[in-house]
Image (cartoon, rainbow, N blue to C red):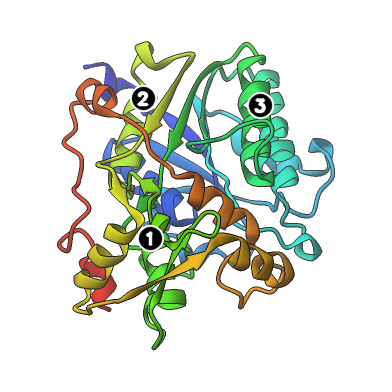
Amino acid sequence: KFEREFRMKVALIGGTGFVGSYITDELISHNMVPRLLIREGSESKLLQPEKCEIVYGDLSHHHDRTSVPAILEVLEGCDAVIYNVGVIREFPSKGLTYEKLHFHAAKWCIEAAKELNISRFILMSANGVKKEGTGYQNTKMLAEDYLKASGLDYTIFRPSLIFGDPRGGNRPEFCSQLKKDMLSLPIPAPNFHKGLNPFNAGNFALSPIHVKDVAKVFVKSLTEEETIKKTYHLGGETYYWKDIISIISRAYGKKKWTIPAPAFAIKTLGALLGGFPWFPITKDQITMLIEGNVCQSDGVYEMFNLIPTPFNSESLSYLKN
């Protein structure tokens, strides 16, 4: 009854990326109106532009909120805000830094929400964030702390590894990137290990979660009061790295051998070459990978009445392309 009279309008910051495109679809399928902040020239990334409201603006080239009038414009008249901006690597020359996009821009949006009396704010964080972590982890943590202190009705989500069809449009997705950068090369895949003992290789684990499940949880939480002022970890079943490599390889019909690779050697390469877009992995990414990325989310699935999508050949069939 309530929904017929009222269409919720949701400001989505980070709506053209991999996860953002699925959140947009999910908002539309719930008869909500996504209001997106997008960069000029990124319109082609929208799959249902006619069902979205678009405000043009770019967070990366600004230094404070007053220089991004588009933030107030995109939030104006909305009932909630989803901040879903994440960069997996930094390119400071293009204005793409963790500090700017994970923390400062999130802070500008939180301030704008307060100014416009929008109390509902959902933040995309990440599993394993911490103060003394990598630049990625540390800036996500700063945004969480700022939001918690803001007085807004927040919900924070910390997903593990998110997988699913990137649907073109140059959207980085872990399994496709892994296939492209490591698995399709004519050499064995690196099975990373800490220290010098190769018998530890691949002993770290991840809990992959499907992008559609993430989008469903985000959108459902908008109207679930019990999620207010809570932080949730999102993950699926747990797999070791070596199993992840074989599940991904099997999904597109390859048998992939792995070779133990000492993480510190790859980290050194990452530190030297991670600033180049062609180098597949950065030092921070290896650090976070080897820490593992595991979490328990059964409670979340029960609460949202969801059956998680398994990490298997069927759900990875997009890798055949």
Q: Which mark is residue 110?
A: 3
Q: Where does the image place residue 180, in percent across and percent down from the top left?
A: 42, 77
- Quarter residue 219 falls in: top left
User: As drawn, is 315 to the left or to the right of 127?
Assistant: left
| Residue under pointer 1 | 47
Residue 54 visible in rendering = no
- Quarter residue 138 falls in: top right
User: As drawn, is 237 to the left or to the right of 142?
Assistant: left
| Residue under pointer 2 | 221
Is the residue marked by circle 3 packed among few (<14), some (14-19), or many (20+) residues within 10 Å?
many
Position of residue 156 relative to residue 70, above or below, is above
Which residue lies at the image location 71% right of the left edge and 49% below the top edge?
59
Q: Earlier in the sequence, mark 1 or mark 3?
A: 1
Q: Could you tell me which secondary element the residue under label 1 belongs to? A: loop
Which amino acid type is shown beneath numbered disc 1?
A: Leu
Which amino acid type is shown beneath numbered disc 2?
A: Ser
